[in-house]
Image (tube, grey):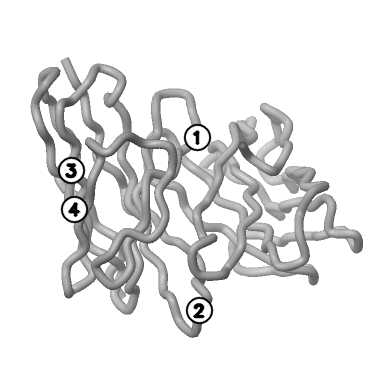
Amino acid sequence: DAKTTQPPSMDCAEGRAANLPCNHSTISGNEYVYWYRQIHSQGPQYIIHGLKNNETNEMASLIITEDRKSSTLILPHATLRDTAVYYCIVRDHNFGNEKLTFGTGTRLTIIP
Amino acid sequence: ETGVTQSPTHLIKTRGQQVTLRCSSQSGHNTVSWYQQALGQGPQFIFQYYREEENGRGNFPPRFSGLQFPNYSSELNVNALELDDSALYLCASSSLRGGSTDTQYFGPGTRLTVL
């Protein structure tokens, strides 16, 4: 079973910041928070991941709460191409425990 | 840097047949994982291969089997196909170093239809 809870769907206006929440209240100390997205039947695309600190890359920012029980993915200036299903996943990096357990994700729709 | 590639893109088989799907890892990666994604669902972990051996399996029957080759490419074999095997099959590669694996990167998938 997935260890994360996400809203099933969200809308965001084009050009605005899209903030996607994720709850992972049972996360353990050695588990990372990963975000992937999937655009209509393509393979999932890696976005970003983090352990404790906030992270930023060219695609997005990841904000993890101090207690690590929740996080938010931020797409700073959403475009129509960001319409996709976004998956929040917690995973271990240790050998033998690396499988990704996907939930149902959040379907993000960018509105023109 | 070459990404993960999969072949074929689409495949149609009939119930009871056998199928082989192929995956080439991203350059520098030594671990391959396979996932099945039914329509409207998130991907489900099938198994992972490292050093040509299966390392971890999800809740899939033995008729799902795999191979990993010395160049780290991989095959997924499914015997005695059933209608419910119709799905998008995804391959993901990653690097295992020092007992720890990093980010998994996915290929575009193979769409299998069983009639």
Q: Name the amino acid, label 2.
A: Gly
Q: Which of marks 1 and 2 is nearer the N terminus?
A: 1
Q: Name the amino acid, label 3.
A: Asn
The answer for how far apart the CA atoms under marks 3 and 2 are is 28 Å
**Residue furthest toward the front?**
B62
Which x, y percent locates residue B62? 27, 39
How packed mark 3 is, by other alpha carbons closer than 10 Å (few <14, some 14-19, many 20 or more), is: some
**Residue furthest toward the bottom?**
B98
| Residue beneath the point at 17% across and 51% down | B22
Residue occupied by mark 2: B99
Could you tell me which secondary element the residue under label 4 belongs to?
strand
The reply to whether label 1 and label 2 mark residues of one chain is yes
The answer to whether residue B34 is left or right of residue B5 is right
The answer for how far apart the CA atoms under marks 1 and 3 are is 21 Å
Q: Name the amino acid, label 1.
A: Gly
Could you tell me which secondary element the residue under label 3 belongs to?
strand
Tag 4 subunit: B
The answer for how far apart the CA atoms under marks 4 and 3 are is 6 Å
The answer for how far apart the CA atoms under marks 4 and 1 are is 21 Å
The answer to whether residue A27 is left or right of residue B19 is right
Q: In which quarter of the image is the N terminus of chain A?
A: top right
Could you tell me which secondary element the residue under label 2 belongs to?
loop
Residue B75: which disc?
A: 4
The reply to whether label 1 and label 3 mark residues of one chain is yes
Q: Nearer the viewer, residue A30 or A72?
A: A30
